[in-house]
Image (cartoon, rainbow, N blue to C red):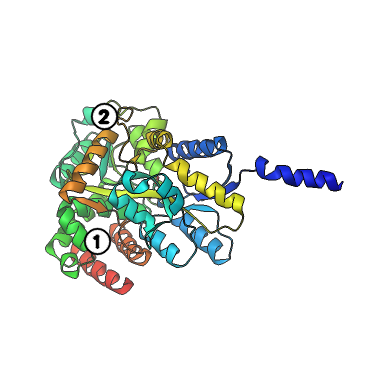
Amino acid sequence: MKRLVLSLTFWMPQVLAGEVEVLHYWTSGGEAKSVAYLQKRLADAGVNWKDFAVAGGGGENATTVLKSRAISGNPPSAAQLKGPSIAEWGELGFLADIDDVAAAGKWDALLPDVVADAMRYADRYLASPVHVHRVNWVWANAQVCKVAGARLPVDWNDFFVQAGKLQAAGFIPLAHGGQAWQDATLFETVALGVGGAEYYQRAFVELDETALNSETTLKVFDVFGQIRRLIDSNASGRDWNLATNMVIQGEAGMQLMGDWAKGEFSVAGQQAGLDYLCAPAPGTNGAFSFNVDSFAFFVQSDPAAQNAQKTMAREILSPEFQEAFNLSKGSIPARLDMPTATFDACAQASMADFADAADAGTLVPSFAHGMAVSEAVSGAIFDVATNYFNSSATPEQGVAELVSAIKASR
Ligand code: BGC
């Protein structure tokens, strides 16, 4: 018996290369396909995947669950974290250092600065970047546009003209899901389109009160408020992917949403340029609101678990993963050295625009997707955006609420 136990102990580490319990919120069609690929890659590398999916677009629900697990001393080994919250968790001592993986993989040279900077805290890598999503997109059903005589809008005046054509032809002009994060995404896109990148940076990244309390912000709320009449009466509570599906089915003409929407068009078998159209959101040509998804790793004492985390961190940056995952997710690779040929026209445009925007200073972090400000500030902006959009408040009231909510949250 003793011999049997000994030989089993001897065998165990070789059989079990470790396990990662992964908390994520990728549950829509395109997201689930992408996450299944990550799971398979890890299985091929000998790492067992324990799935902990918390549904809810934008990750608000997942963040709440993560906090309660971490507070009770039982965090998962890996979780989706992004932007400034990586540093916040790092400062509290929850996150494991993956600097050795980053050094061996030469991440400093491979990653764009804005991506690498978001992954580090105190000069050490604490998270592995999966990709770059662009938030400022407009998507449209090609056939619906043809029937209605509409085209992709170039600015906000044009947006209302094209939406009017769609409405007159009997379509819902804009597919929208009435959830706070989707209202905030819409608000962000309007702010970037109406005010431009410099205004956006000052108002929503630097939180400059003069920029916030300005005529431009008044115009932003005016445009944002006018969109209320272009959505259907069932929008309240609707998930974003169901809104994308309304465009896919030809019920609605357009959707303003980040390029994770492209994952839904792809799983529905639709092709960019043929079945659906994409363009930078109205007024945002040349600007790029970025949203980087990444996995951070929570401190583990078991060496097999640590090893599994490092394998996951390494696999995520492999060129094969960066290509396959991003093809189904709708995003572009986090690595700068990836070939572009297999990506569709929307993704190729996104790659070129990302580089151009970085050079031109028009690359801005998304506040609606956790890249720009602390959770407290973004929470305040979410509340103002959603309350405004779901009321008949005036632009003047919107500006006043925004200024005071941001002030109170800092
Ligand atoms: C995430 C995407 C995700 C989307 C919808 C965004 O905040 O960055 O990866 O697909 O939310 O859940």
Q: Where, quadrant-wise, is the C terminus in this rendering?
A: bottom left
Reading the image, the residue beneath label 2 is 142
* In the image, the residue with mark 1 has its CB under 8 Å from the nearest atom of ligand 1: no
Which is closer to the viewer, label 2 or label 1?
Answer: 1
Residue occupying the point 35% across, 64% down: 374
- Label 2 residue SS: helix
- Describe residue 249's horizontal placement relative to residue 71 as left or right: left
Hey, which residue is sitting farthest top in the picture?
A: 274
Q: Earlier in the sequence, mark 2 or mark 1?
A: 2
Viewer-proximal residue, 386 or 26?
26
Reading the image, the residue beneath label 1 is 204
Q: Are marks 2 and 1 in contact (CB under 8 Å)?
A: no
Residue 228 pos. (x, y %): 26, 52
Residue 101 pos. (x, y %): 45, 48
Residue 395 pos. (x, y %): 19, 62
Residue occupying the point 25% across, 66% down: 402
Viewer-proximal residue, 117 or 222?
117
> What's under tag 2, amino acid-wise?
Ala
Viewer-proximal residue, 206 or 230?
206
State which quadrant residue 253 falls in: top left
Q: Residues within 10 Å of mark 1 (few under 14, many from 20)?
A: many
Hey, which residue is sitting farthest right in the picture?
A: 1
Residue occupying the point 28% across, 25% down: 274
> What's under tag 1, amino acid-wise?
Phe
Residue occupying the point 46% across, 44% down: 314
Residue 139 pos. (x, y %): 28, 38
Above or below 36: residue 393? below
- Label 1 residue SS: helix
Residue 183 shows in the view: no
Whole-angstrom CA distance, mark 2 to mark 1, is 33 Å
